[in-house]
Amino acid sequence: MTRMLLGIFGAVVLVVVAFAALGWWSQRAAPAARGVVDGRLAPCDAAPHCVCSDGDPNDAGHYVLPIDLPAGDDAQRWRALREAVASQGGSVLRQDDAYLHASFESALFGFVDDVEFRLEGSQLAVRSSSRVGYSDLGANRQRVEALRG
């Protein structure tokens, strides 16, 4: 019985250490944000840790609707977006007239996700992706939906 409990404890410790190492790696990895290329945000790769409104609408695993913006000028819209990002614990890393890049870090293990927004008229195209790993257990899709408000 003691041997079995030690084995279970060892396996749990190994999993926690592995996730902590991935979180550390995520904090040091290059951002998943690629900016606007040819007027669009980059498509997601095959892994299920990314969603993008500039992708294929038939790709249910990766596609997400763009975010409709309230009436107002672009400065008001960007200010509201920066406030929404901050209220969810994100940090704006870069912004220009038509693009914003923010990052979010998970509380447990410190995994970093990059979120990009491209302003197009009264909508924001959005791309949210994890920096490392394969699955995000739906965290990026949930974040976009929360930002949609």
Image: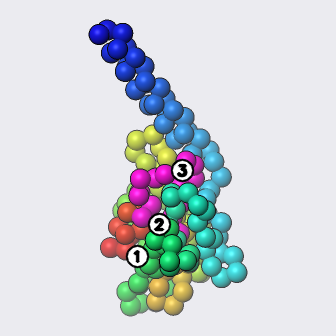
For label 2, the crowd category at 10 Å Cα-Cα, with few meaning under 14, some 14 to 19 and many 20 or more, is some
Please tell me which residue is depicted at 70% across the width and 81% down the height of the picture: 38
Label 2, on which residue? 61
Is residue 140 visible in this depiction of the protein?
A: yes
Return the x and y of residue 111 as percentages of the image width and height.
49, 47
In three-dimensional space, the C-alpha distance between marks 3 and 2, rounded to whole angstroms, equals: 13 Å
For label 3, the crowd category at 10 Å Cα-Cα, with few meaning under 14, some 14 to 19 and many 20 or more, is few
Residue 33 picture quarter: bottom right
Please tell me which residue is depicted at 46% across the width and 53% down the height of the picture: 136
The amino acid beneath tag 1 is Ala
Label 1, on which residue? 80
Label 3, on which residue? 134
Colour theme: rainbow
Return the x and y of residue 117 as percentages of the image width and height.
53, 73
The amino acid beneath tag 3 is Tyr
Please tell me which residue is depicted at 52% across the width and 62% down the height of the picture: 50
Q: Helix or strand or loop: what does disc 2 sit on? A: loop
Return the x and y of residue 87 as percentages of the image width and height.
36, 62
Q: Helix or strand or loop: what does disc 1 sit on? A: helix
2 sits to left or right of 137: left
